[in-house]
Image (spheres, coloured by chain):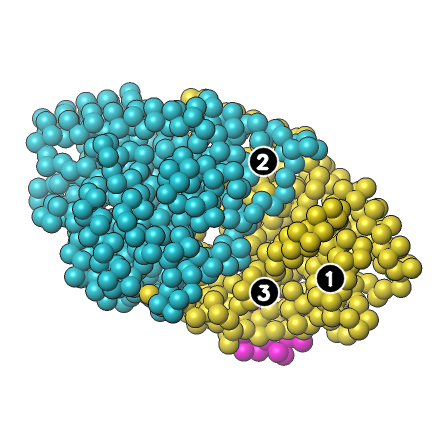
Chain colours: A cyan, B yellow
Amino acid sequence: MRRNTHFSQVASRYLFQEIRERKRDFLQQYPHAELISLSIGDTTEPITPHICQGLTSISSSLGSEAGYMGYGPEQGILELRQAIATTLYHDRVDADDVFVSDGAKCDIGRLQTLFGPETSVALQDPAYPAYLDTSIIHRGRDSIILLPCTPENHFFPDLALAEKADVLFLCSPNNPTGALFSHEQLATIVQFAKDRKKIIVFDTAYSLYIQGDGPRSIYEIAGAKEVAIEIGSFSKIAGFSGVRLGWTVVPKELHYHSGEPVRADWMRLITTFYNGSSIISQHGGIAALQPAGMSEMRELVSFYLESTGLLLEAFKQLGYEVYGGIHAPYLWVRLQGKSSWDAFDELLRTAHVLTTPGIGFGESGDGFLRISGFGKRATILEAIGRLHRYRQ
Amino acid sequence: MRRNTHFSQVASRYLFQEIRERKRDFLQQYPHAELISLSIGDTTEPITPHICQGLTSISSSLGSEAGYMGYGPEQGILELRQAIATTLYHDRVDADDVFVSDGAKCDIGRLQTLFGPETSVALQDPAYPAYLDTSIIHRGRDSIILLPCTPENHFFPDLALAEKADVLFLCSPNNPTGALFSHEQLATIVQFAKDRKKIIVFDTAYSLYIQGDGPRSIYEIAGAKEVAIEIGSFSKIAGFSGVRLGWTVVPKELHYHSGEPVRADWMRLITTFYNGSSIISQHGGIAALQPAGMSEMRELVSFYLESTGLLLEAFKQLGYEVYGGIHAPYLWVRLQGKSSWDAFDELLRTAHVLTTPGIGFGESGDGFLRISGFGKRATILEAIGRLHRYRQ
């Protein structure tokens, strides 16, 4: 059996696995260091009461004759799909076109299988590393077009570079830069995809973090259903990073060149490669989208954005050029001459603070660090104190 | 955007989706029919008390400061991996080589991504349809070799047919035929794979159903770690078909031709395409593998096997040629001249009993029905009564 050669084309470790290994090495050398992580975007606050009640009550009811359930529909429980369509999309999408997943990352991988081996994809650079890595593992490096998004172009890609791509992966509010596409920018992208018969995969994992009027979904743009798939996630809004729950919208209006509906192939793929999200997580999602759950999620998001705001102030006071931090729980900090990994190592060594090197998100991310606003408030304040001391 | 042509090579619906649609059509025509399902292998008994307690207590503890957890390791919680290695494999495998999944079907799909676009696979015919369908969607029909397993060859494939395959997907106890490989048969297969440098993917989703001395795992065969990946599942042993939990073992002893360890690529894939199984399901798995959970699972398995035994007797009394039903919760019933779908439709129409047409598992399955022993006892007895009445 020969090795799948695509694996030799990706970095040997996924970004956050690499950071974990460096952390482990550091702690072996300095076992008493009290590390603070502003690195991986992982939620730290307990699951809120109403949502937790949803998880607990389904768990307990699975133990009763009346409450037991086996396989759910692969597409997800109808009640949850309807709640997503109504509460999060204001009925702009149809519950029929909502597919419940175990998280955005997993559906990014499955979308690669949907698109198949012959597809060329365009990605924002920097971007959440799963887009690039799953693309390489599926088709090798040659099929990938990178679209630099930097302060110099106001984080808006030069679409001319994407002429040859079949699929555009886009994320707004962006991880890692925190940039939000405006309605006008998103309309430009949708028109580009329409004119050139491309498919957009639009990742909105952070849409509940948006302040002001959005756009929160690509479907706010007229005609977007004919060109766009949208990915969403409960991880960062309900603290479900460990519970695992997300969704993907594949509108029935989206067709291939040849006229076949994309949704039919996606349904085939989901029923074949997947067996539905955990029934427990799905009932947690149903609770999250009830009024009490929604208001808990809004409060949780405000808390993380407040922390992000404190970090934003601190980095500005320290004289850094900082982006993001308004519509997303991430800051994108320019390093004035240092490479990302050098800055990562330096902050780890001097302040015992873990960050994420910008280059981990793509070449255009070198010279930046991503700072995550997820964390206990006391930890965030302690990190800010250390940063001030270390800069003096 | 062009359509991925592989989708035009699979049947338009996954087998169990097709059965659901036929059931729906039938119920629209006969809304008062009281259908009984002996079809999809879906558990019906409540989650047992100790295991349910594991699910409930983690769900509730996620709502507390002390108990909250975000992302777990993509590979799975160490405690669960250790319990799988020790309790299910008697330390025959290393916890390091156990990867927790959200179910066997999902890992079958991810293994296809691991093997990549150039691989040729050999499958038992009949077999669990996910092997064939995920293979077609990944690489098209041409890359697939079918290994007929029928009463005529005692359900043991002619390995000479698999000479050109890189990977062999095998399942024992088999779904749908219920056939169990003996130690000698499995040793023959392992030797074949060794001699020809092939990889075996061995699916043991039903291993707890085995009566007598097995083999319960391919790793009971000396040297199997150098050639085999093994898939396992909590679905049918803990009633977790809706909770979602399984595992895959990729031993560090397994290498590609060129010497690279398969495990390293699998780790890269799991960290890139997956974000870990739900923390709640994993804690349910930990409870399931504690002594109280193990004894509950054994009792549950006995219950389903008893039901299967009742069905086995009934079909024999009715004069059918029947296979399986001893080491697996499935009967494989020969139809004496009828096609699978004709028999399916006839049983649905006359006895209002849903079954699974054998041809849904592959061409060699035509002329058979798979009868599932999962169900409430009263339902199984009612189905048996109807079968007797219908046959008269």
Q: Is residue A309 left or right of residue A316?
A: right
Residue drawn at 12 percent across, 41 percent down: A335
Residue labelled with disc 3: B169
In this orientation, does residue A126 appear? no
Say if B368 sits above or below A376 in the image: below
In this orientation, does residue A96 appear? yes
Q: Secondary structure at mark 3?
A: strand
Residue range of the region highlighted in magenta in the rendering:
B155-170
Residue B336: where, in percent of width, then height?
82, 71
Q: Nearer the viewer, mark 3 or mark 1?
A: 1
Q: Amino acid at mark 3?
A: Phe
Residue B385: where, in percent of width, then height?
87, 50
Q: Is residue A283 left or right of residue B318?
A: left
Question: Which chain does the residue under circle 3 lie in?
Answer: B
Residue labelled with disc 1: B344
In this orientation, which residue lies closer to the viewer: A239 or B367? B367
Residue B234: where, in percent of width, then height?
62, 45
Q: Nearer the viewer, mark 2 or mark 1?
A: 1
Residue labelled with disc 2: B284
Q: Secondary structure at mark 2?
A: helix
Q: Secondary structure at mark 1?
A: helix
Q: Amino acid at mark 1?
A: Phe
Circle 2: is it few (<14), some (14-19), or many (20+) Cα within 10 Å?
many
Is residue B161 shown in magenta?
A: yes
Please determine if labels 3 and 1 lie on a single subunit: yes
Mark with earlier residue (3, 1): 3
